[in-house]
Structures are given as structure tokens and as C-alpha cells.
Image: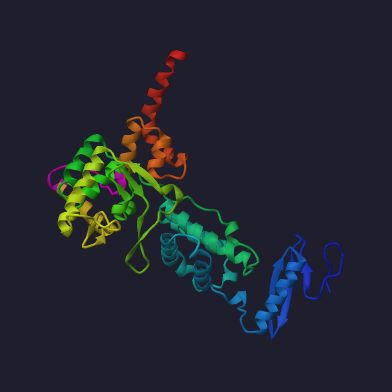
């Protein structure tokens, strides 16, 4: 019979570590398992529950659980109802690409900090982007944090990992005013012209444009309500979901150009569908045969635009649809929009995010603002 740190006798099978934590060992049906808790009463209850599960054949020894098994359990039990479907999809992609091969078949209790460090260091050495390494670290952290809370492992190995930064992000492509005019000119020739031109006039994200419904367009008050975003589903297909964060739910006032683009899209949509009276509110604003415009289709059409520019001898940087969002924000700052207002239009969570992204515009702006107070000194 053991004693606690004060010399008091403890029940059979229970001991206390120097850090104050109690350890309970249960032997039943030839199986020995261990549970931990800092509260003695809680530990006794855990030992009773553990004995019951062993006696009824529902107990799985922590030593036998593989990383692969625990990842599946972590997703289904702790993440599926806590995060967006798109986040689940990115976690699964991350696991398949970077964690399954080196860790999948290993027992959870055998994984040490150096195993995790080696994976992250290898990604860094191969030039993976900072965001990719950050997502992988997030998955690792969540998996082992929950495993420790569930007492499947005696300590969390990820706490001993030093997270590398990874490859710095490429410079964001922002169109100059001259390039913006060229973009609008070549977008006009595309069958996705309304989507491309609306993107640069509103700063909407790819998924927000693809998931835009007619019910989200308020012509009377000249406002676009951002209430949906198109996400790719596991195994293919799509679903129109609510935005990932609360700040992404927002209203974007229409400038005249955006209003005209959406009115043109409305006329073309009615002509295409043969519906000259009323459009269903839950129809997609941009669609083909009732299906939303996929990211793949948008990327393909941007390549066509770039090929057309090259054929015409126009020197233009490679860009993605997200470049139009950066361009929109840059024009806003250049023309004096308050950063706090821009933050709400873009749907950023914090003002610092907006300022970090568009600090390249600020040097001239800061000089102009300082001139306003020059006479005070």
C-alpha cells in the first residue's frame, strides 16, 4: 500500500507522483491499465469506469492505438461538429499528404517529439509554404493535446517541438492601375466576364463569388450580402456553406460599376434560363446549367486570359482570382478609405490583418498624412 506526499496511506493500486498527480493501476482479466488525475476522488471513479470497460470487453489499451486510428477518432468525435466542413477537408488532406506515411501505423504511445520535429523540419527543407507547415502543426497539436486529455499518452510530445517558419510567402500580385485596365479589357472577352469584373470591384473571395445567390443581391439598397461560400467536399462535389468566421458575414455596398455588372448578369441569366419574369432567390448568380462555377473552371479561364495577353504581346504577371481582392484593397487605401472600414468590407477578423496585408501601400499615405499636421509644429 502506497502513501501520498504527506505520508498518508493510499488505496491499493494508487500512488502519487512528486508533481502531485495520482496514478491508478487496474488489473483485470489479465489486462493492466493506468489512469491519471490530480484529484483522488476523480481518479477512483476513473478506475471504476476502467475496470467496468475491461470486464465488459469495451476497453482498448492505449498502447495498441495507432496514430491512424486516433486521427480518425479525433476527427469524428472532436472536430466534425466543432469546425467547418472545409476545415475537416483540409485536415484530412494534410494527414494524407504529410502524416499518414511516417506516423500512421505507429502506436500513439511510441511517438516522440523527435518524430514530429523531423516531419516539420523536412517540410521546411523541401520549401513548403509557411501556411502548409502551420496547418500541419495545428493538426499535430490538436491530436496530441486531445490524446493527453483522454489519458491515452502520459505526456504531450508536441509541446517539445520547435515549429519552423517555412518558406516565406511569395509577394502578392497587385495590379497597377494600368494593369487593372488591361485586366478589365481581357475579362470583357471571357464568358466569365461578369464574375471577373465583379471580383475586382468588390474584393470578394473566390468561394464567396461562386456561392453568391440572388437572394444575397439587394439592388434596391445597392448592397451585396455575404452569407454563403462555396466549399469543395471530400471525395468531390461541393456544398454552399456559411462563411468560416463571423467577420466574413458582412455587407458590401455596390459601387456603380458593381451594380451595372450585376444588372447585366441578371439580364444574361434570364435570357439563358428563359425566365423573363422572376429569378429564384436560391439560384446561383454565376452558374452553368444550374451548377455553380468551380474553382477549376475559374483557374482555367484565367489561363486563357493570360494566353491571350501573351499572344497579343502584352506583358502581364501571372495571377489568381485572389489577386483581384488584393488589387481592390490596394485601390481602396490609395484613394483614402479608412483601414477600419476596409477591414469590414474585406471581412478580416482583425485590423492588424488588414494592415499587415496592405502595408506596402502605406509609405506614401503616411507621408501625405504627416503633411496635414506639419503646420502644428
**Residue shown at 21% from the left, 63% from the top:** 289
- Residue 318 magenta-drawn? yes
Identify whether 252 is placed above or below 241. above
**Residue shown at 43% from the left, 36% from the top:** 340
Residue 303 at x, y percent in the picture: 21, 53
Residue farthest to the bottom, as pictured: 29
For residue 235, what is the image quadrant? bottom left
**In the displayed structure, does residue 298 sit left or right of residue 64?**
left
**Residue shown at 47% from the left, 39% from the top:** 352
- Residue 331 magenta-drawn? no
Q: Which quadrant is the N terminus positioned in?
A: bottom right
For residue 60, what is the image quadrant? bottom right
Dominant secondary structure, magenta: loop
Residue 85 at x, y percent in the picture: 42, 62
Identify whether 108 is placed above or below 364. below
Residue 82 at x, y percent in the picture: 50, 61
User: In the image shown, does 285 or 184 lie closer to the viewer?
Assistant: 285
The answer, for residue 115, to whether it is visible in the render is yes
Identify whether 86 is placed above or below 376. below
User: Which contiguous range is marked in magenta?
Assistant: 309-324
Residue 257 at x, y percent in the picture: 23, 39
**Residue shown at 14% from the left, 48% from the top:** 189
The answer, for residue 171, to whether it is visible in the render is no
Residue farthest to the front, as pictured: 277
**In the displayed structure, does residue 249 sit left or right of residue 177?**
right
Amino acid at each position: 500500500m502506497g502513501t501520498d506526499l504527506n505520508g498518508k496511506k493510499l488505496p491499493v493500486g494508487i500512488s502519487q507522483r512528486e508533481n502531485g498527480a495520482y496514478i491508478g493501476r487496474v488489473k483485470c482479466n489479465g489486462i493492466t491499465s493506468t489512469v491519471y488525475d490530480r484529484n483522488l476522488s476523480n481518479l477512483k471513479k476513473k478506475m471504476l469506469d476502467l475496470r467496468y470497460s475491461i470486464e465488459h470487453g469495451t476497453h482498448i489499451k492505449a498502447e495498441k492505438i495507432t496514430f491512424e486510428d486516433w486521427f480518425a477518432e479525433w476527427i469524428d468525435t472532436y472536430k466534425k461538429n466543432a469546425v467547418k466542413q472545409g476545415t475537416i477537408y483540409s485536415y484530412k488532406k494534410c494527414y494524407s499528404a504529410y502524416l499518414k506515411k511516417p506516423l500512421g501505423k505507429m502506436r500513439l504511445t511510441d511517438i516522440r517529439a523527435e518524430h514530429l520535429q523531423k516531419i516539420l523540419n523536412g517540410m521546411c527543407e523541401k520549401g513548403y509554404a509557411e501556411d502548409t507547415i502551420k496547418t500541419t502543426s495545428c493538426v499535430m497539436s490538436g491530436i496530441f493535446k486531445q490524446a493527453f486529455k483522454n489519458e491515452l499518452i502520459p505526456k504531450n510530445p508536441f509541446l517539445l517541438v520547435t515549429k519552423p517558419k517555412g518558406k516565406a510567402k511569395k509577394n502578392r500580385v497587385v495590379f497597377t492601375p494600368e494593369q487593372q485596365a488591361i485586366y478589365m479589357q481581357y475579362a470583357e472577352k471571357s464568358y466569365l466576364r461578369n464574375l471577373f469584373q465583379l471580383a475586382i470591384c468588390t474584393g470578394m473571395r473566390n468561394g464567396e463569388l461562386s456561392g453568391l445567390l440572388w437572394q444575397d443581391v439587394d439592388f434596391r439598397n445597392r448592397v451585396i450580402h455575404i452569407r454563403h461560400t462555396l466549399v469543395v467536399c471530400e471525395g468531390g462535389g461541393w456544398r454552399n456553406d456559411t462563411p468560416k468566421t463571423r467577420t466574413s458575414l458582412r455587407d458590401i455596398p455596390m459601387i456603380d460599376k458593381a451594380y451595372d455588372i450585376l444588372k447585366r448578369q441578371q439580364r444574361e441569366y434570364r435570357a439563358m434560363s428563359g425566365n423573363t419574369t422572376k429569378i429564384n432567390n436560391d439560384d446561383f448568380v454565376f452558374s452553368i446549367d444550374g451548377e455553380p462555377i468551380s474553382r477549376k473552371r475559374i483557374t482555367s479561364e484565367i489561363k486563357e486570359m493570360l494566353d491571350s495577353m501573351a499572344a497579343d504581346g502584352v506583358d502581364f504577371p501571372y495571377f489568381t482570382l485572389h489577386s483581384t481582392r488584393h488589387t481592390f484593397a490596394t485601390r481602396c487605401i490609395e484613394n483614402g478609405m479608412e483601414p477600419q472600414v476596409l477591414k469590414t468590407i474585406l471581412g478580416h477578423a482583425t485590423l492588424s490583418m488588414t494592415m499587415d496585408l496592405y502595408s506596402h501601400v502605406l509609405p506614401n499615405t503616411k507621408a501625405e498624412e504627416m503633411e496635414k499636421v506639419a503646420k502644428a509644429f
